[in-house]
Amino acid sequence: MTPLNSLNFSGGPGVLPSSVLQQVQEAIIAVPGVGLSVLGISHRSDWFAAVVAEAETNIRTLLGLSENYHVLLLQGGATQQFSMVPMTLLAGKTQPAEYLHTGYWSGKALPEAAREGPIHVAWSGEASGFSRLPSDDELTFSADAPYLHYVSNETVEGLQFHRVLGHDAVPRVCDMSSDFLSKPCEAERFSLIYAHAQKNIGPAGVTVVLIRDELLNDAPTNLPGFLDYRKHIQTHSNYNTPPVFAIYVTLLVTRWLLNDIGGMAHMDQINRQKAALLYRLLDQSDDFYRGRAAVQDRSLMNVAFNLRTPALEKQFLSESLAAGFSGLSGHRAVGGLRASIYNALTLEAVGKLLNFMEDFQNRQLR
Amino acid sequence: MTPLNSLNFSGGPGVLPSSVLQQVQEAIIAVPGVGLSVLGISHRSDWFAAVVAEAETNIRTLLGLSENYHVLLLQGGATQQFSMVPMTLLAGKTQPAEYLHTGYWSGKALPEAAREGPIHVAWSGEASGFSRLPSDDELTFSADAPYLHYVSNETVEGLQFHRVLGHDAVPRVCDMSSDFLSKPCEAERFSLIYAHAQKNIGPAGVTVVLIRDELLNDAPTNLPGFLDYRKHIQTHSNYNTPPVFAIYVTLLVTRWLLNDIGGMAHMDQINRQKAALLYRLLDQSDDFYRGRAAVQDRSLMNVAFNLRTPALEKQFLSESLAAGFSGLSGHRAVGGLRASIYNALTLEAVGKLLNFMEDFQNRQLR
C-alpha cells in the first residue's frame, strides 16, 4: 500500500515531515549511536538527557527565548493544562482570571478553570456562531486579573488571532496547540504558552509548556507532584517517566525546523503561501466553496469551509478520499470540511488539493 | 550499528518483542490497510476506535476479566494514579486507606495519597532496608478501610508478592506497573489495578487501568475532567487526545502475548524459567553474586544483586556493556546491579547473561 502521508490534511494528530518519519523508522530498531530501540531506552540515560536538552535548546533558538523561561515537555495534552494553569495561578484568588471564548477549544478550558477559581469571560463568540474573533474595540481587559487566557488558533472553527492580546501588566497565558512553532509568536510577551505536539511538532502524547520564571513565585506548594510545574522544572521534564518516544520525535521535528526549513520566519512564509492559495480558491469559487471564518480572522493552519449542501459535502469527502486525500472532514462538533495545513503539509500537496477542488467544482457546474 | 535490543536488561522503559518492533517500524510510514503513518492518524478515526477496542478485548481475554471491569488506557504513568486513586476513593473520608510501604515505588505513593486524605501505613519495610516483604503473620488489615493499596512488584528492590493480600471486604488497589501481564494475576480479586506500559506491555506514555464498576459509585463528581475515571470510561479512553502511538504498540504486544506466547500461563512459565536460571546462579556463586531480596520474596521480573565491592560492580557494568549487555546497573536509589527480565527478554538472552556472569566470576577468582 502506497503511503498516503503526503496528502494527510487531518486536523490532528497531523502529518509529520517525511524525513523525520524516516529517522523515526530507523530509531524503532536502533537509535544511531546507541544501538537500542527508542522504545526501550531508559529515561535516566545520558542519551535521553541529551534529547531533552537539545529539544529545549532548539525551541529556545526557534523562538528567541531567554533564560528566564523554562521549557517543559509534559504529558496530558492541552486538557491537562486547562486545569494546571488555574490550579497554579487562580486557586485562592478573589479577582477573576479573564478568558476569551472564541471557539470549541477555548470553550473546553472554561469549566476546568471555573472549578479552580473565579473567571470572567471577557468576550464570547457564541452569539456569532464562532465565525469571527473580537476586534480590539470589542475587548476591555481588566488591568489586575491574575492572568488572561486565550487560544491563539481555534482548530475547529479555523480562526486565528494575528496579534497579541491583552495588557502587558497582566500575565498572558495562551493555548497555542495548533499554531505553535508554525511562525514567530512573540513568545516573550506571554507568561505561559502551552501546546500539545500533535499538530505541528510531534505525535500525540507530549505537550510543550513555556513558562516565565517569576510566574511561579506565588504558586501553591501542595499540588500533586505531577501537576506542579516546579517539580517538572527541577527535574528537567523527568519528574516521572516521560513519554520518551514522543519527545524524541519532537526533537527531530525541531531539528527539521532549524536545519531544513531554516527557522520560524521561513516556516511562516511557507505556511502563508499554502493558506493564501486555498483561501484564494475559496474566494474565487463564486460561493461554491464557502469559508467558515471571517476574512480578517482566517487561520493559516485550518482552512474550514462548507459546500452548498451536506450531500455535496459528503460527495466531496468521498471523492477526495478516493483521490488519495485524507482528513478533509470538518471537526465533528461543527461538520463541514476542513483542510489542515500544518508545517509538514507541503506546498506541493496543497497544489494537488487545489487541482482536485477546481476539478470537483467544474464537474458539479458542468 | 547492530541493534542491541535482545540484550537490553533495562529496568524500564524495557525491551519489546522484536516482532512487535518490526510491525511498529512499518507503521511509522504506513499502517497496513490504512496507508497513513501511525503518528498522523486521527484519534477519532474508525481505525483508532478499533485499536482501542481490540487492546481492551485482548487484555480482558488475557486476564479473564468480566464485563463489570472497565479497561482504560490513560496518560500520566503510575505517578498520576498515585493521585487519581485517593482523589477518587479517599477525599472526604475519615477512615484511613491502608498502604504498604515495601520499597521505592510504594513509598512514592504515600505522600500523594496523604495529600488527598487519611492513610495508615499497615507495614513498612524501611527498617529492614526493603530487603524483604511482610509475611501474613506481620499483617493486620482493617476490615473497613476505604481501600488497601500495595505494589505487586518493587522494581527497584526486586521484591514481588507471590500472593494476593488483604480482606475481600476491602477494595484492593494494586500498582502492577512492573509485573502486569507477566503472569495470571487473579485480576478479579482487585477493585483497581494500574500499570504503566513501559515494563512488559509497551513504550512509556500509556498506562493501563482496570477498574471495577461499583468502585466509582461514590466517586466525587467535581474532579478535573482528565482526572475523572468516569469521563475516560464514557469516552472509551478518548476523553482528550490519547497517546495513539503508545496505545497502538500496546495492542501489538497484547496480540503477541495471545498469539505468539499463548497467554498468561505460558508467559509465566517462561518468566519463571528465566528467573530460576538467574537466581540459581546467584545461589551457587559462593556469595560472589549476592541477591538483594529475601529468597521467598524474589521478583520474577527484576533480579537485583550486589558484588563484594562497588569497584567490582563498576567493573562488571563496564565489561557487560562491552560484551553487548545493557541496562544492568541498579536503580540510582539503591545502586548495585539489576537484571530486569521482562516478558520480551528471551530465555536465550538470559542464557547469554549467565555465561557472561560465570565467566566474569571465574576471571575474578583466577
Image (cartoon, coloured by chain):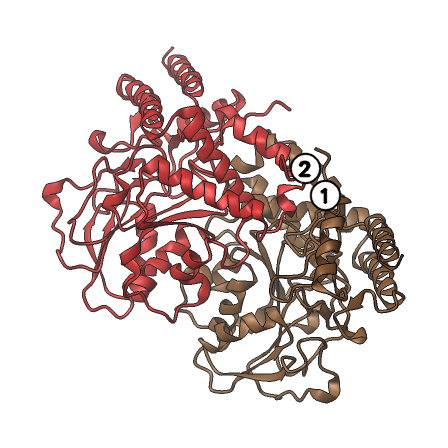
Chain colours: A brown, B red
Which residue is denoted by mark 1 in the rendering? A5
Q: Which mark is residue B29?
A: 2
Residue B73 at x, y percent in the picture: 45, 49
Q: Is residue B161 shown above or below A262? A: above
Kindly state the secondary structure of the residue where label 2 is placed. Answer: helix
Q: Mark 1: which amino acid?
A: Asn
Q: Mark 2: which amino acid?
A: Ile
Residue B178 at x, y percent in the picture: 37, 39
| In contact (CB < 8 Å): disc 2 and disc 1 | yes
Residue B205 at x, y percent in the picture: 50, 47
Q: Identify the chain of the residue marked 1, using the numbered disc in the image.
A: A
**Residue A36 seen by the camera:** no
Which residue is nearer to you in this view: B156 or B254? B254
Which residue is nearer to you in this view: B215 or A200? B215
Residue pushed farthest front? A366
Image quarter where the N terminus of chain B lies is top right
Q: Identify the chain of the residue marked 2, using the numbered disc in the image.
A: B
Q: CA separation, marks 2 and 1?
A: 8 Å
